[in-house]
Image (spheres, helix red, strand yellow):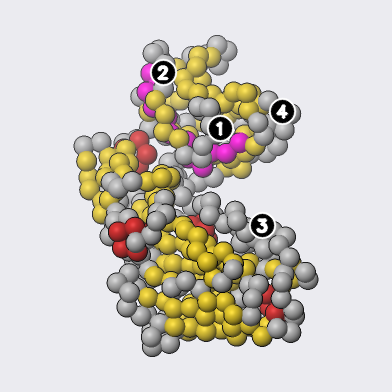
Amino acid sequence: MRWFRALTLGGLTWVVGCTGSKVADDLDIVLKGRLVDEAGAALPEAMLKVYRSDNSSCAFAGFTASWKSVKARADGTFELDLLGADTRNGSIARCFVLRSPMQREGRSVSAAFLVQESEVELPVLQEWTGSMSATEEARGVSVGFRSLRATHGLESDAHVLSVRPSLREAWRVTEAVSPVHLSDYVLEDAAGLQAFVTVERDAKAGSESVNLTYVSDERALPRRALVPASRGAACTYLNAETPCRLTSGALDGLVLFQTGVQEVVVQLARPVVPRKAVLRNFEVSGAMSELVLEGSVDGAQWVPLANLLEGTGARPFVEVDLTGTTSVSRVRVRAVPRETTGQLRSLGQLSVFE
């Protein structure tokens, strides 16, 4: 599933869900391409998977089972015969994703496209290793990588660094520039973390746009040892579970809040002066007037610790300095909606450090 997560980082918005098909049901269509490694050498006998959506969008979570597969020849070329009826759902063009086999090291390359012509020749699918590295530092880990521009000569190479212990991301850095410093606050004491980088770019296949997604090799990160003061703390929100999943230390966890939740309170095991907070997989819905972190001694009087809007709206991964100067025993995330629909939607972990 990592390939799909990479695809939905932001580059498929060009594929809308209701683009009309331009081909007839009985039209013979040929899909062509070539798969090579990072050095440009052919990848013979590689089995590429073809995925097909129900409409013109590839950005949806149910996009899992492959529709067809096609094997590369000795020179890395591949060819797949289709009918127009295969490429449409009623009058709507289907979005296709063609993905290379995921290598043992984790790398893959994929293309997302519509089929609107009798012959579709995709841009060369060239793998990218990223030459990933991870070096321990005094207060974290430095992750280095070689940009896609350096190996593929592309003009656009906005890189996204992801960290994960399993399928769901535990951290993400957009517009990443090598080397990326991951603090001990971000890494905590989690074991088995892997880092990889994703790059997307647009190309052309005939008159149609193709979105290419490159995923680098994975790199194991050294285990760090920082434990937040909030680890194992109780929490309060509508229908909260016990023990609290938001403070468990599972960095890839996720709580989907029920409708109407506008605050989450964490009860610390002991009072601390909070210096830093990290929020993971954090999402709100609706427009917000305020989105803040606050602290309290007694749960009655609250003092501000951080503004989570920062003029740009809520971010899914947040590492923020806290402004409190006195001990608190409770920390809360509070949303003040601008509209009646505003609420907290999800949160993976809320970690508070002294």
Alpha carbon distance from label 1 to label 2: 20 Å
Task: Residue type at mark 3: give it.
Answer: Val
Confirm or deny contact between disc 4 and disc 3 (CB under 8 A): no
Q: In this rendering, is residue 48 above or below 239?
A: below
Which tag, 1 or 2, sits closer to the chain's start?
1
Viewer-side label of 4, 3: 3
Q: Which residue is mark 4?
A: 339
Q: In this rendering, is residue 278 above or below 13?
A: above
* Residue at image point 29% right, 54% down: 145
Viewer-side label of 1, 2: 1
Which tag, 4 or 3, sits closer to the chain's start?
3
Image quarter in which the C terminus is found: top left
Task: Residue type at mark 1: give it.
Answer: Gly
Confirm or deny contact between disc 1 and disc 2 (CB under 8 A): no
- Does the image show residue 349? no
Q: Which residue is mark 1?
A: 313
> Label 4 crowding class (10 Å Cα cut-off): few <14, some 14-19, many 20+?
few
**Range drawn in magenta:** 272-284
Alpha carbon distance from label 2 to label 4: 28 Å
Q: Which residue is mark 2?
A: 323
Q: Circle 1 — which element?
A: loop
Where residue 336 appears, x then y in whole percent?
Answer: 64, 24
